[in-house]
Image: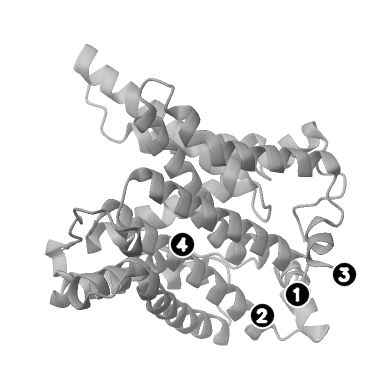
Amino acid sequence: MSIWRRLTDGVPARALGALGLLAALLVVAPFLLRFMSAGDYWLSILILVVYFSYIGQAWNIMMGFAGQLSLGHAIYLGLGGYVAAALYVNLGIGPWLGVFVAVAAAMLAGGLIGFLGFRFSLAGVYFALLTIAFAEFTRILFDHFKWVGGSGGLFLKVEADGSAFNLQGSPLLFYYVILALAAAVFVLCRWLLTSRLGYYWLAIREDPEAAQAAGINVLRTKLLAVLISAGLTAIGGVWSAFYYKSLFPESAFSMGRSIEVTLAPIIGGLGTLFGPIIGSALLVGLGDLFTSLAEWLANTWDVKTAGLKQIGYGIALLLIVMFRRDGVWPWLARRLGFDRQREDRP
């Protein structure tokens, strides 16, 4: 079977058409935004949507596909960003080469966490606590690691010429880089779901003991999910470090950042391909709405609105748990007639 047939097998023509239209819109969106007022602002919003869909898809491999709950994914984002940024600042190694070292570092950390967790049969909330503990330990370590700035942070110098070779340039450059990454991880996840490994993950997610009895090497299969997820997340961390041009241990490895990674696929739909995309659009949209509301309340009524954005996220999660436990995308897919073959699940 050809790669194209394998990727599209069982997918309704209507869904393929909608996906092609979405891809085309995302490619031309920056040029369309130029004709709008505050086009730069809306481009920054679109960048965040694509970024969160990418890292949400990376986390989705581990939780949505293989059923392994990680609440410390900031460790892979932070390691990816710090390794690539430190190599660039201290040794002059550009991000296109540094990303390979960053991915290796994140996968090494993921392999250690996964091996310890799975070797000692930690699952569910206990494995999640292990991931949180490692992320917190790494935060403390980097807080005292002077080579990367310690608690004072690591700052990337802005190049005057904006060389794309060093991932320096306008927001437009960063948009197309993260868009290419998001498209690549989308195709990769579709390929994984239609592979033998994808079916192994499904079996383990539904019943690990039955999967073990069927002859699946559960430890190795779980570890593969962790390694792939960690490596892809690290790439997102590299992009984020060069986009924002600063890193602080307190934020890079924070629990809040880990939660941000999980929200898009949870709200959009765990284990689906479109879930992280829909979830990130909703999250970024809600975040912008609540930020604007907070500013309006502060300026108009002098009301203190600290934490309003987090409250909005909490309300969104509560509504999802109450009314759409599978996420928004499965419900939306049924409405649009896209799920007859359940094309986005293994």
Reading the image, the residue beneath label 1 is 200
Per the rendering, the mark at residue 71 is: 4
* Residue at 68% in and 37% down: 21
Callouts 2 and 1 close, C-beta under 8 Å? yes
**Quarter of the N terminus within the rendering:** bottom right
Density class for disc 2 (Cα within 10 Å; few <14, some 14-19, many ≥20) is: some
Density class for disc 4 (Cα within 10 Å; few <14, some 14-19, many ≥20) is: many
- Of badges 1 and 3, nearer the viewer stands 3
* Residue at 37% in and 54% down: 257
**CA–CA distance between discs 1 and 4?**
23 Å
Residue 339: quadrant of the picture = top right
* Residue at 78% in and 31% down: 335
**CA–CA distance between discs 3 and 2?**
24 Å
Dot placed on the residue nearer the N-terminal end, 2 or 1: 1
- Position of 272 compared to 260: left or right? right
Per the rendering, the mark at residue 1 is: 3
